[in-house]
């Protein structure tokens, strides 16, 4: 695992609809590691093929092996500038989930499109009508950056650094879902070295506000009309839950808040995890939120998910720790490096040929029939 690359990606400013700096970083990285890619009409990055034509050819092949479509998203909840109240006070609008308490006086970062980052303080905050997340507020910026038009600026909650590591735990302004993007990129690199013709990676925009980029990609019709079998693999960084704890391994995600995923795909992934990560993986429905596997399922494409357990989901101080302003107040997200390594193992194994996608339960059926064989004589009764 290239930890230096991971930490560099986590430093990049991002917010819904403001993923430009992450996109540029990823483009540079894909060029460096020689992974082909292109962007669709929404700005999502498609890895593993260099053009729409190559994508369509891959999906149109008469092959038994399914294309593994790994999906992660490039945004994280944050705000957009709306207008200047004065030279150092910016009115902002929030997009996505957020802390609900201890907001006023909390530290924020503000970026322009070129990546110049300024420090600020949230000087006022208004929650949405249901009191579930931040809706709008004002930001007092320490430096005068009013030469930038307000709508070009964006930001989020800030901490001592954009990213830092301690004892195998990475703390950051935004792990969700830049960690998933990192794993997808590393898997793309592996697929390119193998010259795999069964890998596609999709890094999407505006997931935090309703899967906007992912939905737009499905609406292009390329995946819906594929002749070759498909399996979508959602790579997420998901809220910790009982049975899905930081440092206990990646999570085989059985479903999300919206529903369960595809049974055969779950069984294939479960068998891989049991073989390659015995006692080092977790398995449960991750119903603390929803993910892009649901977009695939409702479009009738088989899907499964792998999650990295995420401390302080959406910068909410559920688990506390360094720089946390209090329960449900702003706090850095955190993840375990060992969990990320485990996710990389699962993704690499999913690229292998001859996995039992069509019938992963054949061995289990034999086991069940053995129970019948052992007990059939006892079924006789007078």
Image (tube, grey):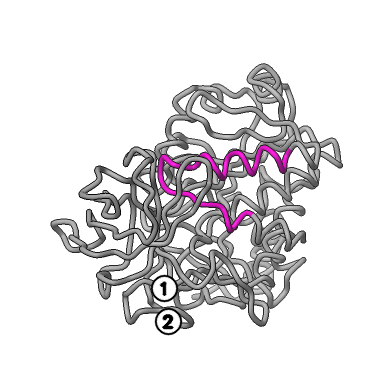
Q: Is residue 372 above or below residue 34?
A: below
**Quadrant assignment for the N terminus:** bottom right
Where's residue 284, x and y in %? 50, 67
Q: Is 279 left or right of 190, judged from the image as shown?
A: left
Where's residue 265, x and y in %? 60, 50
Q: Nearer the viewer, residue 311 or 287?
A: 311
Label 1 element class: loop
Q: Nearer the viewer, residue 243 or 181?
A: 181
The residue labelled by disc 1 is: 331
Where's residue 205, x and y in %? 47, 40
Q: Which residues are magenta?
A: 9-30
| Circle on res. 259 | none
Label 2 element class: loop
The residue labelled by disc 2 is: 320
Q: Is 324 left or right of 359, judged from the image as shown?
A: left
Residue 18 is inside the magenta segment: yes
Q: Nearer the viewer, residue 331 or 318?
A: 331
Instruction: Check disc 1: other Cα within 10 Å, few if <14, some if 14-19, many if 20+.
Output: many
């Amino acid at each position: 695992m290239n930890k230096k690359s991971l930490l560099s990606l986590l430093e990049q400013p991002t917010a819904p609809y403001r993923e430009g700096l992450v996109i540029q970083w990823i483009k540079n990285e894909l060029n460096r590691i020689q992974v082909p890619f292109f962007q669709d009409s929404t700005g999502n990055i498609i890895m593993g093929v260099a053009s729409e034509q190559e994508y369509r050819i891959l999906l149109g092949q008469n092959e038994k092996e399914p294309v593994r479509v790994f999906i992660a998203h490039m945004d994280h909840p944050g705000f957009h500038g709306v207008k200047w109240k004065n030279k150092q006070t910016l009115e902002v609008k929030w997009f996505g989930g957020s802390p609900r308490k201890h907001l006023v006086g909390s530290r924020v970062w503000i970026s322009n499109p070129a990546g110049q980052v300024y420090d600020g303080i949230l000087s006022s905050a208004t929650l949405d009508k249901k009191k579930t997340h931040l809706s709008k507020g004002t930001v007092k910026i320490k430096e005068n950056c009013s030469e930038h038009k307000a709508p070009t600026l964006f930001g989020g909650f800030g901490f001592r650094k954009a990213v830092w590591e301690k004892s195998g735990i990475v703390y950051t302004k935004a792990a969700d879902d830049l960690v998933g993007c990192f794993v997808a990129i590393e898997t793309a690199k592996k697929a390119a070295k193998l010259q795999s013709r069964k890998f596609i990676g999709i890094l999407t925009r505006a997931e935090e506000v309703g899967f906007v980029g992912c939905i737009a990609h499905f609406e292009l019709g390329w995946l819906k009309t594929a002749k070759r079998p498909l399996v979508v693999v959602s790579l997420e960084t998901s809220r910790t839950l009982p049975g899905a704890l930081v440092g206990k391994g990646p999570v085989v995600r059985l479903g999300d808040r919206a529903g369960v995923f595809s049974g055969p795909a779950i069984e294939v992934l479960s068998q891989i995890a049991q073989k390659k990560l015995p006692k080092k993986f977790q398995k449960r429905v991750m119903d603390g939120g929803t993910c892009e596997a649901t977009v695939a399922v409702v479009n009738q494409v088989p899907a499964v998910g792998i999650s990295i357990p995420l401390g302080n989901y959406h910068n909410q101080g559920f688990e506390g720790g360094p720089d946390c302003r209090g329960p449900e107040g702003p706090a850095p997200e955190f993840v375990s490096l060992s969990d990320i390594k485990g996710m990389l193992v699962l993704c690499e194994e999913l690229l292998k040929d001859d996995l039992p996608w069509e019938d992963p339960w054949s061995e289990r059926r034999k086991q069940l029939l053995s129970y019948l064989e052992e007990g059939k004589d006892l079924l006789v009764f007078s």
